[in-house]
Image (cartoon, helix red, strand yellow):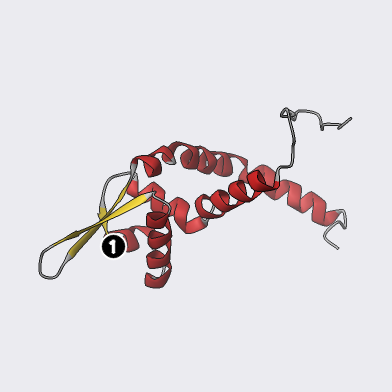
């Protein structure tokens, strides 16, 4: 019988299905990435041009923003619309799937801000106790 830690819930069925683990890991790698979270949050206000995004995000490099947007587009979270102007105008916008990510991303950000002091304190206690090895 599996013993669960206090306060955790046990899900029924097989707790480790390799296929499910890979799927979850793959999605979390995309949506848990620092720049993905910031790009999705920024696009939550509506469509933006590349340079608008870059300016809003501050320290992101052109290459990293390009890679992040391509990954988001590939995963169906962002659409890229090219307008036939001279020079061409390109807008990036969240898809319905991308918009569905706004709430969990916002919740996770709120949780991180709220709990950062507690995590900082826990790390200090851990390190002071000599557990940092």
- Asked if residue 59 can be seen in this view, the reply is no
Vertical position of residue 10 compared to residue 92: above or below: above
Q: In this rendering, is residue 63 above or below 93?
A: below
Residue 30 visible here: yes
**Quadrant assignment, res 44:** top left
The percent coordinates of residue 129 (x first, y second) are 87, 53
The residue shown at (51%, 54%) is 30
| Left or right: residue 111 compared with residue 103 | right
> Could you tell me which quadrant the C terminus lies in?
bottom right
Which residue is at a point 83% across and 55% down the rendered structure image?
Answer: 128
Which residue does the numbered mark 1 point to in the structure image?
50
Q: What is the x, y in percent for residue 99?
A: 37, 40
Quadrant hosting residue 54: bottom left
Q: Residue at x 26, y 50 (%)?
A: 47
Question: Residue 24, percent across and down?
Answer: 60, 46
Q: Position of residue 14 (x, y in %)?
A: 75, 35
**Of residues 67 and 39, the one drawn nearer to the viewer in this rendering:** 67
Tag 1's secondary structure? helix
Q: Which one is in front, 100 or 60?
A: 100
Tell whether 58 sits left or right of 1: left
Dot 1 alpha-carbon crowd within 10 angstroms: few under 14, some 14 to 19, many 20 or more: some
Name the quadrant of the N terminus.
top right
């Amino acid at each position: 019988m599996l013993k669960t830690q206090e306060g955790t819930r046990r899900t029924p069925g097989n707790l480790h299905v390799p296929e499910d683990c890979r799927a979850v890991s793959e999605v979390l790698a995309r949506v848990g990435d620092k720049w993905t979270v910031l790009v999705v949050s920024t696009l939550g206000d509506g469509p933006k041009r590349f340079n608008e995004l870059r300016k809003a995000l501050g320290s992101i490099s052109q290459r990293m923003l390009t890679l992040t947007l391509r990954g988001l587009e590939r995963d169906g979270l962002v659409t890229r619309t090219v307008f036939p102007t001279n020079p061409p105008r390109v807008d990036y916008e969240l898809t319905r799937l991308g918009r569905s990510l706004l709430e969990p991303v916002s919740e996770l950000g709120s949780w991180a801000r709220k709990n950062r002091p507690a995590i900082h304190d826990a790390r200090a206690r851990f390190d002071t106790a000599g557990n940092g090895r």
